[in-house]
Amino acid sequence: MANDEDTLVVKQDGFEKESAMSQDAEKVIDHFELFRGPEYTEMLANKKSMFEDPVPAEELVRVAEWTKSKEYCEKNFARECLTINPAKACQPLGAVFASLGFEGTLPFVHGSQGCVAYYRSHFSRHFKEPTSAVSSSMTEDAAVFGGLNNLIDGMANAFSLYKPKMIAVSTTCMAEVIGDDLNAYIKGAKEKGSVPMEFDVPFAHTPAFVGSHVTGYDNVMKGILEHFWNGKAGTVPKLEREPNGKLNFIGGFDGYTVGNMREIKRLFDLMGVEYTILGDNSDVWDTPSDGKFRMYDGGTTLEDAANAVHANATISMQEFCTEKTLDLIEARGQEVIAFNHPIGVEGTDRFLMEVSRLTGKPIPDSIAKERGRLVDAIADSNAYIHGKKFALYGDPDLTLGLAAFLLELGAEPTHILSTNGGKEWAQKVEALLASSPFGKNCHVYAGKDLWHMRSLLFTEPVDFLIGNTYGKFLERDTKTPLIRIGFPIFDRHHHHRYPVWGYQGGLNVLVKILDRIFEHMDATTNTVAKNDYSFDIIR
Amino acid sequence: MSANLDVEEVKERNKQLIGEVLEAYPEKFGKRRAKHLGTFDADKGECAIKSNIKSIPGVMTIRGCAYAGSKGVVWGPIKDMVHISHGPVGCGQYSWAARRNYYVGTTGVDSFVTMQFTSDFQEKDIVFGGDKKLSKIIDEVQELFPLNKGISIQSECPIGLIGDDIEAVSKRKAKEYNKTIVPVRCEGFRGVSQSLGHHIANDAIRDWVFDKLGDKPARFESTPYDVAIIGDYNIGGDAWSSRILLEEMGLRVIAQWSGDGTLAELEATPRAKLNILHCYRSMNYISRHMEEKFGTPWVEYNFFGPSKIAASLREIAAHFDDSIKEGAERVIAKYQALTDATIAKYRPRLEGKKVMLFVGGLRPRHVIGAYEDLGMEVIGTGYEFGHNDDYQRTTHYVKDGTLIYDDVTGFEFEKFVEKIQPDLVGSGVKEKYIFQKMGVPFRQMHSWDYSGPYHGYDGFAIFARDMDMAINAPVWRMTKTPW
């Protein structure tokens, strides 16, 4: 462990010093280099030794090493109450995601306002796009008297300022703890004239202390469909289903939604499928810089959302994001098919074959050719992946989809973890692993967090880690190279614009994995006259 | 659009513009928002607006909450303590490592800033209460992170609503482990913005750190030149590029609040001869308390841009003897060449450019001088969570005719920028992409857009470079199709 305690010059007297200066107007250096200059390193070393009451160097090393041990791993896994570095967010985040997939829709989150600032920032940091959502800004008085007035006033303001076609209401934990009743409140707001009586205000209760962001997605998607299909809050008759041969498609909470939705639409168009995407965020999170800010762009039209009841079937790409939604749809007589974020050849095969079966449309040769190209790419490159051990974490569906792809590539998934995965998820992963000889040494961790993963990476090391941006802390601590796939990705740009679904998407994921493997090879074979014989020009 | 207007025309334009945006609101709320929008009038010397009032619902306020003010701002950066986000998972998740409070330490072993500790409340915790869980969590923190110097409990909304007694748990556990454990009642529904969270967090330091000090011995011999940096969160290293100047002028910085700070530094602060306060908004409370209780004077300073830095160095030095006053002059002289070169390089590219700001804390006023050092002009500014005293202080910075907007709503801000067409907008990540799509250059002025530091002389060079790269990027020529 780096510790330069011994080399410090501790100045006890005469603090005046004429230190060096690294900054230069001609070559401005920022935090990356500035603080590595001698004037700052000395300053920080003095700060530490004189004022920080630092842990003695040997003790620090001892404890740091202990955190890597089997003993620590056991203590870490014995945790019952503390969660450290979880890979999940709360329901209302998913609620906002689902709401934004509909045309002209303003997500309205009933509760404290800080939450909405967080959701907006969180999405903007991932997509590098604006995210519009409003709050009812409840404070202490609303905690005592309930948030009815906040909702009445908030709906009126949101409607006047932002002219939405629909306001989709969800809740923060504050509103849930005090028990605000959205159904009654929205009726109250309409009676007070906040929005016209016939204006669409679907809603869902989305308590942050139940489930995770995927649950919130599910609740709002269900809430929106219920609203349109079951009589729009009593303003019109309940829709009678008249099957029209169309196919509904739901993507679920997906960090790659921009690229994925466009890829799915391309595939459906190639097949000539008549479809409705329920929840299409691909335009609202990918608007152009052309001098105009589009608060709303694209999305499922409200008419399509209503007519989706008449479809023959609904496909969900993410089972755990749509459990209640699919129950609702199935109860209206449609066939429902749920996938687990299919990635790679066989996952995409199954998806397209189901689409073909449900619609009667054959899979065209052009798509078969795309498939062949992905198989070709895997054949070209799999030698670099075969037998490599991978740790993997993320949302329940994504981890299933990625694990299946790793098995196809001949990789050996070793740790698969999902903080918001439960027993049912773990069983599915176990079944998947049992289906391949490459899955036999893998362990599945439901409900665990990234501090658990840290212990695993020390005690049972792997070659590569797949996860979101927060995996970089694991990469730093355990030196396991990170392949960034998941949500959120804050520290790499634009990956959400590229699909991971379809054969093209599989190719993108393959390249992400390969690039990291090759980078790692080059970075570990570049010491001149020591190991650079393996610094190959052709790989 | 505003290029050739004189001050009276600007004032008239602002008045019209404010009238236009207010028309979009339902009448009752237009009236309420009217009190937050205005134009600075140099003759009257006031911004003439109301502030620190509840945001109106449904309008896309840019504000956050008390938890954000306490965990996100004041407590989170204290590096050797474990800060537990107590409640459901989200609050801690969205604020996890997001604020760039730089620190040096071994994360997960003796430092914990970029970690997310949460009690991840489930329904049963809401129903049966979370005190037992909290108690067990503290045990688990002790077990897995034995080098932590203390623990803070950052309350999320449900804690105050379900009647948990986190103070009792903290007291009991503090005794059991002989350790600083700080319960903070920063539930997000308290107050109107982050601001009350700052205040509550300050009070928690008073009650659970200072008042528990007892007769703990000092860790060092005092000198007449001991100062504490208060209200610098070391975003991108700001506190470091400030500290270096103070040390170079002969002062000794015994504590940083709270960027790269430690519990030992908090505890040592009552021994400072002078508290020097950068972010007045978030830490004036504890500065006033130390003045009353320990007799420690405090002085506000501004380390953005060479003009304000020099003035601040001299003002700080005025509290000390001649050796320090000479030290201040020596520091100013040392960096003169860097300052001159920076201005010579960047001012010609930035001269006359107009800026609109909307930030929190101190920045809506503090950065104005830095822009002016580069020949730029701030024509609109406002605070997310400022109080009257912030707007009062703002009058010393802004020019006649500056548009002032408090707790601006997304709608208002977009309309203002659309009509005024400034050359640069400085605000946060939620605003950034909106204005860039409108073709307006933008810099995040909370996170320094992942750059920084911006404080001090070293930081000013970076600030100048960044403003230049924002405004003069070739991309802005291409937003319109050429056909």
Image (cartoon, rainbow, N blue to C red):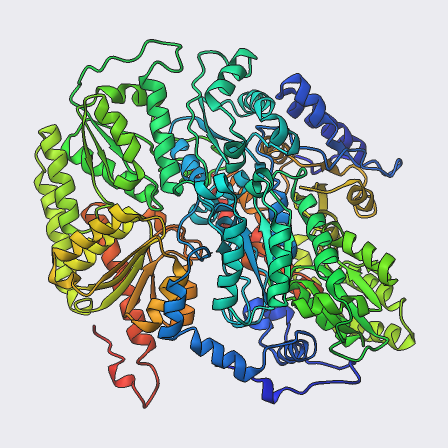
Among the 4 quarters of the image, the one containing residue A81: bottom left
A230 is higher (above) or lower (below) than B177: above
| Along the line of sight, the residue nearer the viewer: B348 or B177 | B177
Q: Residue at x 63, y 52 (%)?
A: B168
Return the residue found at the far right.
B322
B320 over B417 or under it: above or below: below
How many tags in the picture? 0
Q: Is residue B86 visible?
A: yes
Nearer to us in this view, B58 or B406: B58
What x and y, as percent, mark residue A314? 21, 30
Is residue A30 depicted above or below B24 in this figure?
below
x, y percent for residue A533: 25, 85
The residue sitting at 35% across, 74% down in the picture is A70
Judge by depth and name the residue closer to the eye, A500 or B224.
B224
Where is residue A97 shown, x and y percent of the image? 40, 37
**B115 on left or right of A146:** left
Q: Quadrant of the N terminus of chain B?
A: top right
Q: Is residue A229 shown left or right of residue B345?
A: left
Question: Residue at (10%, 47%) from the top-left corner?
Answer: A369
* Left/right of residue A486 with respect to residue A315 in the rendered view: right
Q: Does residue A480 appear anywhere in the picture?
A: no
Q: As drawn, which residue projects farthest toward the bottom?
A: A529
User: Picture quarter containing residue B60?
Assistant: top right
Q: Percent from the top left, x then y, of residue B391?
A: 79, 42
**Which quadrant holds residue A259?**
top left
Q: Residue at x 64, y 47 (%)?
A: B185
Quadrant for the C terminus of chain B, please.
Answer: top left
